[in-house]
């Protein structure tokens, strides 16, 4: 096929402040809680360490450990990530290591296990679980990012309360809670289980993180257990205001370099691609509206977990080869989202995959296609837009044109370079 759209490299202004000294912010926020009144010298404190790609999570956790050491407590980390890492203790340690989190870098033990303790039966009639190691500690400190969830809506989505469920609940809890959501809905389940965990599992505090549109740490709050719900509700509004977005509302083709669990729970953030409610089209009141998605590969940090790839219509054979299908299936089934683990139609090169996508967009000619090319759904400061958006780029005060229109830079094998740093890496 010939006649591809030419593309414009643009930079978009992203929202939200940046905390200059993250360790100092962690110490200050925790100090304001006066935890020395609750945590006695020598007592153990289990700190949750999740698998999401939170910027500077290693710095945040290290500062938390240091603060607790200053109280003469005995902190340690527990992997809090449901089924990630293949739902094994070793796999979850590996996930943390890729995030820069190890006993050497944290200065404390990391105690990983998949065994859980039965806390009680929820009012809705299902078991509530807690990581066995965390449950044996004198105290639990919950650390997590507040953001829009990729599947659930409501005034509480991803945050400290959800970390109590699918984080501390491990694989056993994640399986049960995702099933319960089908019958009772996410708002009821997250409130029911979180309330039980807060009442019975010796949670001493929470550390809530919000990132800006550039994925930098924008806000940190230390929270007492009784304030978890109010905090999650309040910070969710802020997180949604700052979250990165595509600068255009209707696309024929979205070309994505990489997906991964370090980028989003669904590999590609559904809030960015407009597929929170349906896997292959936007809901009537959902934006953007993207006709076709082409995935070129997986991120290194995802470790082969390709959960979410099923939301794309097309991908490269390279992406399929990078996928650990066993890991992907475990994750997608645990989340009760089986289609997310299904494979799209795959092609040997970027050119072949894009050719296929452009043949399925309707009557618009390929060279006129409305196309966006991004590194991933998290890093959206610099992206390429087809020349058809030139007028919108010119009118949008949040967009800066970085150069003239250019042809898609296919190499001799029919593949494209990667987006790195400020744009397309020709290497």
Image (cartoon, helix red, strand yellow):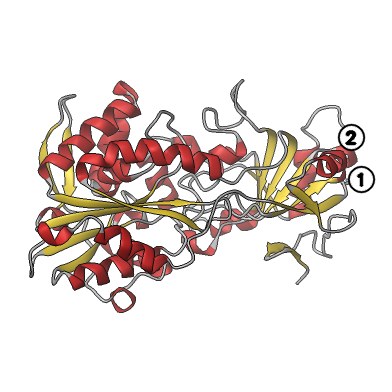
- In the image, residue 344 sits, relative to residue 221, either above or below, namely above
Say left or right for 154 vs 78: right
User: How far across and down, in percent of the image, does residue 265 sit?
Assistant: 45, 46
Residue nearest the viewer, comparing 376 with 43: 43
Total marks drawn? 2
Label 1 or label 2, whichever comes before in sequence order: 1
Q: Answer few, some or many: residues within 10 Å of disc 1's Cα (few below 14, many 20 plus, some between 14 and 19).
A: few
Q: Position of residue 84 (x, y in %)?
A: 36, 53
* Mark 2 residue element: loop
What is the spatial separation of the Cα atoms under label 1 and label 2, in whole angstroms? 8 Å
Q: Position of residue 335 (x, y in %)?
A: 38, 39
State the image quarter where residue 65 is shown. Answer: bottom left
Mark drawn on residue 3:
1
In this orientation, does residue 58 appear?
no
Q: Residue at x 49, y 66 (%)?
A: 20
Q: Residues within 10 Å of mark 2 (few under 14, many from 20)?
A: few
Q: Is residue 336 left or right of residue 8?
A: left
Q: Which mark is residue 365?
A: 2
Judging from the image, what secondary structure is the residue with disc 1 in? Answer: loop
Q: Image check: 74 left or right of 301?
A: left
The quadrant of the image that shows the N terminus is: top right
Residue 324 in the image: x percent, y percent? Answer: 47, 56
Do labels 1 and 2 touch, CB within 8 Å? Answer: yes
Compared to residue 106, the image places residue 246 above or below, namely: above
Picture residue at 32% right of the left edge, 69% below the top: 63
Whether residue 77 is visible here, answered yes or no, is yes
Camera-side residue of 426 and 40: 40
The residue positioned 57% from the left and 50% from the top of the image is 213
């Amino acid at each position: 096929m010939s006649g591809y759209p030419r593309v414009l490299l643009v930079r978009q202004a992203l929202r939200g402040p940046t905390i200059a000294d993250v360790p100092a912010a962690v110490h200050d926020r925790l100090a304001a809680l006066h935890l020395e009144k609750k945590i006695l010298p020598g007592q153990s404190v289990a700190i949750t360490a999740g698998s999401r790609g939170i910027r500077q999570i290693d710095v945040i956790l290290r500062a938390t450990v240091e603060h607790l050491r200053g109280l003469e407590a005995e902190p340690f980390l527990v992997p809090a990530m449901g089924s990630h890492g293949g739902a094994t203790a070793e796999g979850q340690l590996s996930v943390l290591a890729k995030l820069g989190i190890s006993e050497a870098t944290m200065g404390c033990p990391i105690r990983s296990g998949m065994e859980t303790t039965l806390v009680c039966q929820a009012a809705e009639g299902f078991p509530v679980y807690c990581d066995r190691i965390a449950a044996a500690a004198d105290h639990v400190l919950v650390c997590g990012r507040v953001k829009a969830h990729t599947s659930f809506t409501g005034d509480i989505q991803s945050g400290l309360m959800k970390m109590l469920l699918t984080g501390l609940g491990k694989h056993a809890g994640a399986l049960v809670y995702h099933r319960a959501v089908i019958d009772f809905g996410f708002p009821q389940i997250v409130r029911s289980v979180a309330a039980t965990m807060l009442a019975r599992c010796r949670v001493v505090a929470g550390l809530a993180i919000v990132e800006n549109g550039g994925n930098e740490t924008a806000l940190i709050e230390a929270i007492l257990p009784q304030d978890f719900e109010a905090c999650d509700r309040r910070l969710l509004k802020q997180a949604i205001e700052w979250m990165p977005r595509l600068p255009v509302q209707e696309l024929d083709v979205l070309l994505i370099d990489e997906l991964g669990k370090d980028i989003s729970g669904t590999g590609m953030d559904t809030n960015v691609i407009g597929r929170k409610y349906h896997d292959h089209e936007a809901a009537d009141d959902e934006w953007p509206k993207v006709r076709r998605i082409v995935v070129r590969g997986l991120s290194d940090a995802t470790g082969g977990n390709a959960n979410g790839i099923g939301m794309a219509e097309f991908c490269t054979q390279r992406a399929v080869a990078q996928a650990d299908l066993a890991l992907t299936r475990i994750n997608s089934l645990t989340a009760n989202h089986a289609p997310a683990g299904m494979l799209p139609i795959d092609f040997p090169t970027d050119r072949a995959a894009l050719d296929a996508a452009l043949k399925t967009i309707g009557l618009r000619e390929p060279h006129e296609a409305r196309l966006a090319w991004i590194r991933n759904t998290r890093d959206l400061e610099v992206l390429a837009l087809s020349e058809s958006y030139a007028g919108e780029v010119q009118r949008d005060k949040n967009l800066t044109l970085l150069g003239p229109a250019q042809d898609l830079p296919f190499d001799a094998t029919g593949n494209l370079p990667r987006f790195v740093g400020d744009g397309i890496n020709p290497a």
